[in-house]
Amino acid sequence: QVQLQESGPGLVKPSETLSLTCSVSGGSITSNSYYWGWIRQPPGKGLEWIGTVYYSGYTSYNPSLKSRVTISVDTSKNQFSLKLSSVTAADTAVYYCARHLGGTWRRAFDYWGQGTLVSVSS
Amino acid sequence: EIVLTQSPGTLSLSPGERATLSCRASQSISSTYLAWYQQKPGQAPKLLIYGASSRATGIPDSFSGSGSGTDFTLTISRLEPEDFAVYYCHQYGSSPGTFGPGTKVDIK
């Protein structure tokens, strides 16, 4: 059973960089050609796809965030990470990591982390 | 970007009743690329349906999905107490992948 767990600071100051890591257990991040994604949800609101990474280093980002987002993968640690720069209060959200079902980014998300709340405030 | 609209915003029903949730896309989507998720308070979304009509692992057959083009439907044939939650549709065929705003199914 694949499990995902987000980790990182719960509070980030405006204009700084939000950094989160997703640790994958129960399977290798390189197995079966899975793609891995980040999704966020502002309090009381809907879901927004942030971006997706493949273990080879391929990435795809939401154009609305592309200028500020970097997603990377560390196969030795079985982890992938999110960096979001120049954050504002509008970036306050629960951040989820998740796995795409199947060997392409054009798949639903079948496994999700529990989510981590990141607040942007001075 | 494909915009997904869900209706109704809130659906108030009693246990045992049938729930019909709608998801409409701003442009045609291949049915291969439409999913439904259930989210309960404080929890991550849970995949129910992918490919418009395929149930995810462990999802009971009381949940069914249908539709094509721009109109998709999630049906819960008989509501159980644990089914009261928020439901989101998600298109992942066109980048960026987008989610609908959700339909809340609450107890009448």
Image (tube, coloured by chain):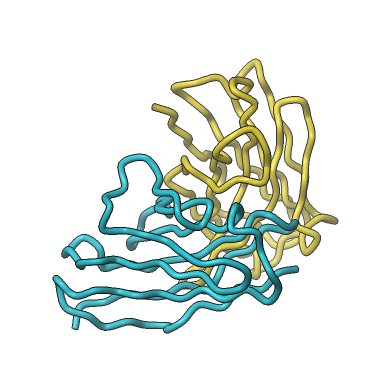
Chain cyan in the figure, letter: B
Which quarter shows the N terminus of chain A?
Answer: top left
Q: Residue furthest right?
A: A67
Kindly identify the residue that appears in the image at 71 percent across and 37 percent down: A53
Q: How many marks?
A: 0
Which quarter shows the C terminus of chain A?
Answer: bottom right
Picture layout, residue B103 above or below residue B37: below
- Nearest the eye: A38 or A92: A38
Q: Quadrant of residue A81?
A: top right
Picture layout, residue B106 above or below residue B53: below
- Nearest the eye: A115 or B76: B76
- Nearest the eye: B53 or A25: B53
Kindly identify the residue that appears in the image at 37 percent across and 54 percent down: B43
- x and y percentages locating residue B56 in the rendered image: 40, 45
Kindly identify the residue that appears in the image at 36 percent across and 59 percent down: B64
In the rendered image of this protein, which colour is used for chain A? yellow
- x and y percentages locating residue B74 in the rendered image: 40, 67
Q: Is residue B55 left or right of residue B77?
A: right
- x and y percentages locating residue B21 in the rendered image: 40, 74
